Amino acid sequence: MAKEQLMSYEDAIERFEVVIGLEVHVELNTVSKMFCGCANNFGSEPNTNVCPTCLGLPGSLPAVNRKAVESSIAIGLALDCQIASNGRFARKNYFYPDLAKNFQTSQFDEPIAFEGEISIELETGEVFMVPIERAHMEEDAGKLTHVGGATGRIQGAEYSLVDYNRAGVPLVEIVTKPIYGALDKAPELAATYVRAIRDIVKSMNVSDAKMERGNVRCDANVSLREKGAEKLGTRTETKNVNSLKSIENTVRYEIRRQAFILAAGGKIIQETRHWHEDRGHTSAGRPKSDADDYRYFPEPDLVPVQPSKEWIEEIRQTLSEKPALRRKRLQTAWGFADLEFRDVLNSDLLDEIEATVSAGASPQSARKWWTGELARLANAQQVAVQDLPITPEQVAAIQRLIDSGELTDRIARDVVAGVLAGEGEPAEVIESRGLKIVTDEGALIAAIDKALASQPDVMEKIRDGKLQAAGAVIGAVMQEMRGQADAARVRELILERAK
Amino acid sequence: MSEITPDLVRHLASLARILVTDQEVEQLAGELGVIVDSVATVTKAVSGDVVATSHPIPMANVYREDVILPSLTQLQALSSAPDSNDGRFKVNAILDED
Amino acid sequence: MTEITSSSAAVLAGLISSKQVSSVEITTAFLDRLEKLNPKTNSYLHFNRENSLAQAKKADQQLADGTAVSPLHGVPIAVKDNLTTTDAPTTAGSKILEGWVPQYDATVVRKLREASMPILGKTNLDEFAMGSSTEFSAYGPSRNPWDLSRIPGGSGGGSSSAIAGHLAPLAIGSDTGGSIRFPAAMTGSVGAKPTYGAVSRYGLIALASSLDQIGPVTNSVMDAAMLQDVIGGYDPRDSTSLPNSLGSMVQSVKEADVKGLRVGVIKQLSSDGFQPGVKACFDDTIEKLAAAGAEIIEVDCPSFEYAVAAYYLILPAEASSNLAKFDSVRFGLRVTPDGNPTIENVMAATREQGFGPEVKRRIILGTYALSSGHYDAYYGSAQKVRTLIQQDLAMAFTQADVLLTPTAPTTAFKIGEKVDDPLAMYLNDVATIPANLAGIPGISVPNGLASEDGLPSGLQILAPAMQDAQMYRVASIVEKLYMDQWGASLIARVPDLEAL
Ligand SMILES: [Zn+2]
C-alpha cells in the first residue's frame, strides 16, 4: 500500500480542532466466565476452557456471573457513574467465526453504568475532566490464528484456526463522550486516560490489567474540524490499540493524516482502521456500511439486572483508593522530587517500590534499585522490569545487607544477578557464591602490606599529602580480595598505616 | 404495495448469511410482502404509552456464583467439528477485513 | 396392538413398580411396534433398540435392588428431536444438524434418565419446530394415525403420532405457539404447555426463547400430570426458570371437582372461523360443564385480534438470532462452494443448503423485523401487543378460573393442503398463540370427533401463570365427562394401524 501523506503535526494543530473519543475494553479477572462456569484462564491449552454455552452449542443457555456484575458496578462507581436501576443484556448480531453464537451478548440502551467522569493529569500538570458516557458489560470473543500467507496476518492466510477459551470472558467496555479542547495534547491525553483506567481497574483488582495480554484494549476515535466550525468532522475508529505508546502514536498519526486530506479538499471516510506499531502508521479496514446493522434486541434468555441500593452501597464500601489520590499520598510520604516520581510512574513501578518499602527498604534505595540496576537488567534482557524473577522482599533484604555494611553496592549487584539466575534467596546466593564482604581486618592488613611491598613509593606520596596515591593500593587490595572488601574501609586502613 | 423489494431481500439475506439465488429472491419478496402486510397490523394496535413485554414472567437479578464448573475436554469440544487442526476449529480464510 | 402398548403410562408404571411386568418387557413391546409401524407414521427420526433396552434393564435392576426412583420408573418415553441427547443424534428436523450427536444432555433428558425412564427414540418435527404439520421436516412428514393421508399437527407431529399410534406411552414436546397443543388436538391426545419457566429449556434447541416451553404429550390427563411432575422444577442453567415449585399436578388431578368452577369462554375465540364440527364439539363440552355445575362466563380479549401478527414478528426475530449459530464452524453441516471460498462464502452456502424454505423465510422476516429503522414499528410494537394480551388475560382471569377455547380451528388437514400458503398455515395457531405470548399454561384435551369428517377435535384449557395445577384439575374434569359418555378414551378409537 502506498504510504499516506501527512501534514506536519504543528500545522495540523494550528489549523484544526481535534475531537477524540475512546472506548476501552477491560477484561475482568473473575474465576469463571461471564455466562458459564468455564475457567477464565489465560494460556490454557486451546479449547479446554469451553462448554456448550461458550461454544454456542444448540440448546445451551447463559447464566450471569454475579461477581462480574459486581466488578462492573465497582468500575462504574470508580468512574463516578450512575448505576442503572434497571439494566438489561442485549444481543448484538453479526457473523464472525470467533463469535460462537454469531451474536455477542452485550448491553445496548440500558448499560449498567452511565454519565461519569474522570480527572486526568498530564505531564505538565494540566488537568482534564474526561466525560464518561457509559460502561457496559459484555463477553469477549474467541481467538483466531491465521495460518499460511506472509506473516500470520489475516491478509493472504490459507486458513484460520479458532480457540474459544477466551469466548465468554467478561468484559466491561468504557466509552467516553467526545473529548474537546485537548488541542496539541490530544495524543498525550488519550494515552494518559487509558493508563488511568488501567491503573484504576488494577488497583481495584477487578482486572489483571496487563495490556500486553489484551486485558485492557483501546479503540481510538479521532475527528478534525476547522477551527470555529460547529459541525463535527467525520471520524475514524482505530481498533485494538494495545499499548500506551501506540495509543499516543495512533492519535497523532490520525490527526496528521486527516489534516492532510482535509486541507487538500478531500473527505474523510468513516471507517475502522488498524495501527501498525512496527511501521508507524494506521491502515484502512472496512468502511462503515449498512452491513453494520447489529439488530440489537433484549436478550430473551436473561432477565434484567436491577441492583438494589444496598448492593450498590456494599460495593461502594469495598472500593479501593483512587489511583490519583494514591499517587499523591505516596509521593508525599516518600519525599520524591517531581522528576524522580515521574520516572517511577513512567516505568510503572509504583507497586514494586511500595512493596519494597513496606518490606523495610528506604524509599530512595527502593527507587534506585527498581529504576536503576533492575531496569537496566530488564532492558538488557528485553523483558518488563516487573517480570524479572526477583521480588520486592528480596530487593529489600539485599538493601538491608548493604545498610548493615555486610555487602557493598558492587557485591549486592552480584547477589541480584544470582537471584535472577535462579540461585535462590539472597542469603543462599551469598553463601554459594561466597560473596560476603571480608571484614577480617587481619586479612585486609595482610593484603595491604603485600600491596605496599610491591609499591614502596606509595607510602611516601601519602605522607606528602598526595592521598590519591592510595587508589593504586586499594585497587590491588580489592583484586586480592576478589572484590569482596569494603573499599572505604581499605582506604581508611591504608591512611592509618601511613600515619 | 409492499416495501419488500428484491434488493431488500438480498440485503436481509446477506445480513442473515444465507446465499440466495435470483429466483429465490423473487419468490421470497412476494411471500414476505404478503406476510409483512399482514403482521404490520400490530402497529395499529398499540400506542406510545404501552410498555413492551420482552419476558412473559417478570423476573430480575438471576445470577450464578463465580465458581468453576466442569468444562468439555478438547476432544469433546472438537468432536462434532466439520474440520479441526492443532486443537482448534479449522475454517476457510476470512475475508480481508477486520 | 398388545395390552401393554394400549395401556396408559400410569397403568404401566403400576405394573412395573409392583413387579408384574418388567421395564424390559414393556420397552420391548413398544420397540417391536414402532419398528414395524414407524415406516407408516414416520413418528421417529432415530431409535436404537439396544440403547433403549440397556436403559430398561438398568431400571429393572434398580427396582430389583430397591425401590422405584420416580412414579414413572421404567416407563419408556419418546423425546422430540430438538432436545439434546448424548446417546442419540439430535437434528431438530433439519439437514443442517444431520448426524450431530450432542456433547451434553438437555436438563429434561437428564431428569428422564434420573427418573429411570428409558428413551425409545427421538421424534419428528417441522424443521426447528417451525410449522404446524411436520411437512417442513427435512426428513419427511409424520402421518396421522387417524388417517395416514393427513397431518398429525406440528411442530410436534412426531410425538403426537407416536402417542395416538401407540408407538410410545409418553412423549416430550415443545410448544412455542402451539406445537404441543395443536398436534394433540389433531390426534386426539393430551398435550400440555406449562407456565413459561416451569420446565427448564436448557438443551432445547431454541426457536423463540421468550415463547418456548417444554411439556408432556400423552394418552391421558393423569399421564401428563405425572410427566410434568417429573420434568418440571427449577434449573440454575436456565435463568428464566421459575424459582418456586408449582406443586404436584398429580395431586390436583386426583382432587378434580367441578363445584364452584368459573369457566370463561373467550368471545374472540368462540365465534367465526371454526370448522362447524369443531365448534359443535366445543359447544357440547361447555353445555356438559354447565350441566355439571360450572358457571359459564363470556370474557372479552380484544387484543387477541393482534396475537398472530405479534407472534409472527417476535418469533422470527428471536429465531433469526438463535439460528445464527448454525454456521458450519463447531458442529453440523459444512458446504464448501467451488473455487477458493472464504469462510463467509462457506457459511452462506451452508445455510442456503442446510435450511429449508420455511426456516429461511422466517429468518429473513425476523432479520427485517429487527433491522435498523424497523425495530420500533415491528418488534417494538409486537412486544407492546404482548403487554395488551397479558392485560386482557389478567382481566379475564378476575372473572373466570380458567378459559376454554377450541384448540384448533379445524381437524387434521390433508398433507400438502396448506404447505404452499404460509399465511393459512400460520392461522392454525390462532387459539394457542396467546398463551405463549403471555407465558400462561395451556392444555389440549380430546373433545370428541367432528361430525363432518370423524376426526378428533381438541379443547384448550388456559389458566393463570403458575396455576398449572388448576389447568390439570379442569382438564381432568373434562376428561371424566367424556369418559362417562364414551366409556373409554378417545384414542381407543384410533384405527388399527397394522391394518392400514
Ligand atoms: Zn463455558
Image: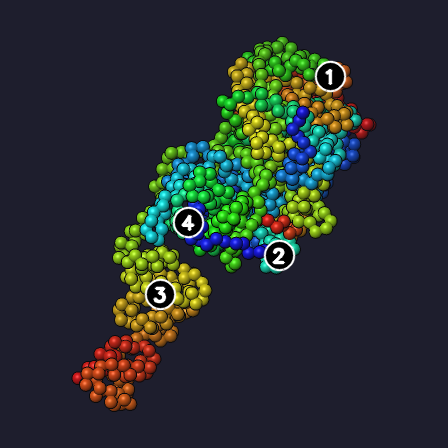
The three-letter code of the residue at mark 4 reads Glu
Task: State the SS at label 3.
Answer: helix
Q: Residue A478, position in %: x, y? A: 31, 80
Instruction: Report the residue at 33% width, 82% height from top.
Output: A479
Q: Which mark is residue A372?
A: 3
Disc 2 to disc 3, how far (Cα)? Answer: 42 Å
Label 2 vs label 1, nearer the camera: 2
Query: Which of the two labelled residues, at mark 2 and mark 3, occupies the earlier sequence position?
Result: 2
Q: Is mark 3 within 8 Å of ligand 1?
A: no
Residue A147: give its label: 2
The reply to whether label 1 and label 3 mark residues of one chain is no
Q: Where is residue A432 in the image (x, y as percent from the top left)?
A: 38, 74
Q: What element carries label 2?
A: strand
Does residue C496 appear in the picture of this structure?
yes
Q: Does label 1 point to a residue whose CB lies under 8 Å from ligand 1? A: no
Camera-side mark, 4 or 2: 4
Q: Which of marks 1 and 4 is in front?
A: 4
Say yes or no: labels 4 and 2 on the same chain.
yes
The quarter holding residue B86 reads bottom right
The residue labelled by disc 1 is C450
Tag 1: amino acid: Ala
Q: How crowded is mark 1: few (under 14 residues within 10 Å), some or many (20 or more)?
A: many
* Above or below, comparing residue C358 to residue A234 in the picture: above
